Image (spheres, rainbow, N blue to C red):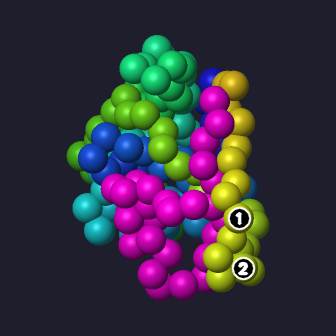
């Protein structure tokens, strides 16, 4: 399956960044990369299922033609050190804004695998919160 999504990873855990064109997928990916994440894919992400130690695992990777490339709006197509394939640990939906200070746990079903989901938060701390989620998860 190929999704219209960007994807970065840290410590072998990937976040899918979902949203329509112009919503900021590449921009968020670049912010996360500036905090230490590595590029998996920009704009198009390939998803596959693999058997893991805890059952089926959703894996993200880049199409060969786009591997190691990311768009920086107003700057151009930039080269980046790429990683992948990487297990998906989180999805971010840029189409929906989070209004709740402590939102409920949400998930997204992709290829029959449930992936934790967060909505966009208009805060300078949002990229750092995503990386913290990838590293250590969320408390209830």
Does any portion of residue 72 appear in the rendered image?
no
In this view, the residue in front, 11 or 33, is 11
The residue that appears at 45% across and 81% down in the rendered structure is 125
130 in magenta: yes
- Residue located beneath label 2 in the image: 100
- The vertical placement of 64 against 123, above or below, is above
- Is disc 2 placed on a helix, strand or loop? loop
Outermost residue on the top side: it is: 51
What span is colored magenta in the figure?
Answer: 113-140
Lateral position of residue 90 relative to residue 32, left or right: right
Residue 70: which numbered mark, if any?
none
Residue 119: where, in percent of width, then height? Answer: 67, 65
- Residue located beneath label 1 in the image: 104
50 in magenta: no
- The vertical placement of 124 against 31, above or below, is below
- Is disc 1 placed on a helix, strand or loop? loop
Marks 1 and 2: CB-CB under 8 Å? Answer: yes
């Amino acid at each position: 399956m190929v999704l219209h999504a960007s994807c970065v990873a840290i410590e072998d855990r990937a976040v899918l960044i979902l949203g329509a064109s112009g919503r900021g997928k590449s921009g968020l990916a670049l912010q996360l990369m500036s905090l230490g994440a590595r590029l998996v894919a920009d704009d198009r992400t390939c998803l596959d299922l693999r058997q893991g130690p805890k059952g089926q695992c959703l894996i993200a990777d880049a199409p060969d033609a786009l591997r190691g490339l990311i768009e920086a709006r107003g700057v151009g197509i930039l080269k980046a050190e790429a990683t992948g394939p990487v297990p998906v640990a989180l999805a971010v939906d840029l189409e929906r804004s989070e209004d709740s200070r402590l939102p409920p746990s949400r998930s997204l079903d992709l290829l029959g695998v449930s992936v934790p989901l967060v909505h966009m938060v208009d805060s300078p701390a949002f990229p750092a919160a995503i990386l913290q989620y990838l590293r250590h998860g969320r408390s209830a």
